[in-house]
Amino acid sequence: MSSGVSSDRSEKWAKVRKRPRKNGTICYSVTHWIDGKQTSFPFDDEQAAGAFEALVKVHGATQARAMYDIPPPTPRGALGSKAITVAEYLRHYIDHLTGVEQYTVDKYEEYLRNDIAPILGDLALVKLREEDIARWVKHMEATPTRRKKPPSPKTIKNKHGFLSGALRAAVDRGLITSNPAAGRRLPRRTGNEDGDADDDAEIRMLTRKEFGSLKDATTEYWQVFQEFLVASGARWGEVAALKPTDVNRETGAVKVRRAWKKSSKGYHIGPVKTKRSKRTINLPLDLIGRLDYSHEWLFVNRDGGPVRYSSFRRNVWDKAVARAGLNPPPTPHALRHTCGSWMLAKGIPITTVSRHLGHEDIQTTVNIYGDVDRSSFESAAAVMGELLSDDNA
């Protein structure tokens, strides 16, 4: 055998090979034998590849793959003796994900079931082309959501991102030669980074008068909760997961460190959305002084348990919105956007607003609220006016 492979195709033979990817990066592929057939597995890190190679040489490829939780090798372009379809591959991909929250797995299941399988599912994975991805994206753009409105660019971006990531993994495993979804131009992003709304119309910012009407129409028990949502600009799951110990009553500093998550397995506490979402914000001391610190959670329902979005919206929010006559009717998420718009309207620097809201980067804040912060544009106009006046002097 070439390359030093023994004639018995031993499961304890392995070799690391440095291979370039089409995107310009490098992977370290460990070639080995299983059941008399040569296969390989890619690693991004040379040291990790070397460690796997060593395990194969000591324990054999089958045991080494099991120790790394690597699924059995799949023949190129096939699942057993049957050609892999896109749906079959994605089913396998989702089933073997590790280190992913159940909420995310549920979303991927939904994408596969409702969006990908009906259009691309029956195609052979090896025959999937860029034209098929383009057709799929256009179909999503033209298909109304459950609310009978077009999906937002952010929603399409999320679904495309899942498919592209799965296809990238198929390239790494040698199932396909290139990723047909890579580099696909998508509808322009609207900036709704939180995923709480299905379309741009949901990005609602309340005026001070509208918020006053909403507060007056809300039962007294929930009024301070509404004020907190506006002042903090935090996501619903972040506010509902706050504990009394997260609040410094002397300085008004509030630590945002966790969030409630909902999945097919029910509610559970998980990490905040992004690294920047883990933050400390400051709120008015008057508001801090009116909070109830006697329960496990900072905000609780009337039974003393955690506040749940669906129950609050159905029993409190929607009724208050109707009594206040707000049109178009906002969702609770509108209070987060209201926070951002109010701060910018009063001249708070957009960098501060971005950090207060926990955006991953300032571009997200600019995309959502760029037109709200008119102060810099007004200053620019004043400068140009002065320069023109000097020229005319």
Image (cartoon, rainbow, N blue to C red):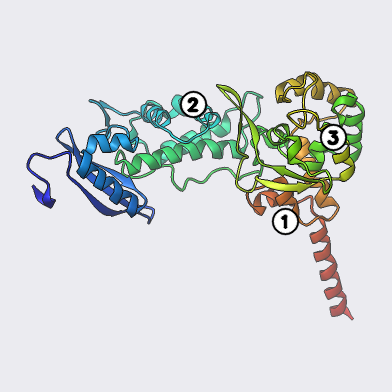
Provide residue 11's location: percent of width, then percent of height.
Answer: 17, 38
Label 2 vs label 1: CA separation? 36 Å
Residue wearing tag 1: 351
In this rendering, would 134 be left or right of 68? right
- For the question of whether residue 247 can be seen, the reply is yes
First of labels 2, 3 by sequence position:
2
Provide residue 52's location: percent of width, then percent of height.
Answer: 29, 45
Disc 2 and disc 1 in contact, CB within 8 angstroms: no
Residue wearing tag 2: 109
Estimate how packed mark 2 is, as few (under 14), some (14 to 19) or many (20 or more) residues with alpha carbons within 10 Å. Answer: some
Q: Is residue 300 above or below residue 26?
A: above
Label 3 vs label 1: CA separation? 28 Å
Name the residue type under label 2: Glu
The secondary element bearing badge 3 is classed as loop
Residue wearing tag 3: 291
In this rendering, would 40 be left or right of 180? left
Residue drawn at (25%, 47%), measured in percent from left and top? 53
State the residue in front, 72 or 253: 253
State the residue in front, 390 or 224: 224
- For the question of whether residue 21 can be seen, the reply is no
Estimate how packed mark 1 is, as few (under 14), some (14 to 19) or many (20 or more) residues with alpha carbons within 10 Å. Answer: some
Name the residue type under label 3: Leu
Residue drawn at (84%, 36%), measured in percent from left and top? 227
Name the residue type under label 1: Thr
First of labels 2, 1 by sequence position:
2
Which quadrant would residue 199 be assigned to in this image? top right
Provide residue 46's location: percent of width, then percent of height.
Answer: 33, 54
Provide residue 340's location: percent of width, then percent of height.
Answer: 77, 46
First of labels 3, 1 by sequence position:
3
